[in-house]
Image (cartoon, rainbow, N blue to C red):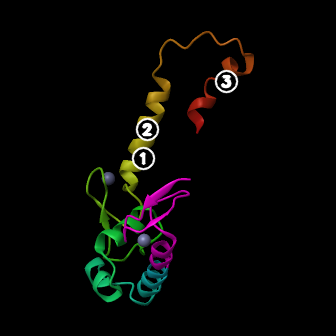
Amino acid sequence: MNVRNCKKCGKIFTYVAGPPICPQCREASEKKFDEVKTYIRENPKASIPQISTDCEVETHQIQQWIREERLVFADDSPVGIPCEKCGAMIHTGKYCEKCKAELATGLNASIAKPEMPKPEPKKDFRNNPAMRFLK
Ligand SMILES: [Zn+2]
Ligand SMILES: [Zn+2]
């Protein structure tokens, strides 16, 4: 049996998957999340510190929800978090659109790089080299 200490309250609990948080704390966190979500809907212009104070949630928890794309702010909202790559203001996720595009390009480049592909006997693979770039 996989037993761990809850990261929040320190209580020992049976760990299954996900963040190492006991069921009680997880439930409390979900309740908070709903509260914050409702608050943001009713106060779309509220800043993160303001949300933090009014909902009694730590700012880093709010930011985590934003990074996880669970909280999404409107495009015209002043609330945002910095892109993890370039620091531009974004409303959800980890990266701004520009960095996302760059990361996608970098990913394609690294796929295209291996210059000596092993001789592939499979016919359909060799006949469609462009397929690998289309995604
Ligand atoms: Zn706990
Ligand atoms: Zn960026």
What residue is rendered at 31% in x and 65% in y? 81
Determine which residue is flagged by label 2. Answer: 105
What residue is rendered at 47% in x and 68% in y? 22
Q: Position of residue 54 (x, y in %)?
A: 32, 89
Q: CA distance from mark 3 to mark 2?
A: 20 Å
How many other residues sit within 10 Å of disc 1, few (<14), some (14-19) or many (≥20)? few
Q: Position of residue 17 (x, y in %)?
A: 54, 56
Query: Of label 3 and label 1, which has the lower sequence position?
Result: 1
Q: Residue 101: which numbered mark, if any?
A: 1
Q: Position of residue 82 (x, y in %)?
A: 28, 61
Name the residue type under label 1.
Answer: Ala
Determine which residue is flagged by label 3. Answer: 128
Foreground residue among 104 and 5 = 5
Instruction: Find residue 51 and report its image quarter.
Output: bottom left
Name the residue type under label 3.
Answer: Asn
| Position of the C terminus by quadrant | top right
Foreground residue among 21 and 116 = 21
How many other residues sit within 10 Å of disc 2, few (<14), some (14-19) or many (≥20)? few
Looking at the rendered structure, the secondary structure element under dot 2 is helix
Q: Is mark 3 within 8 Å of ligand 2?
A: no
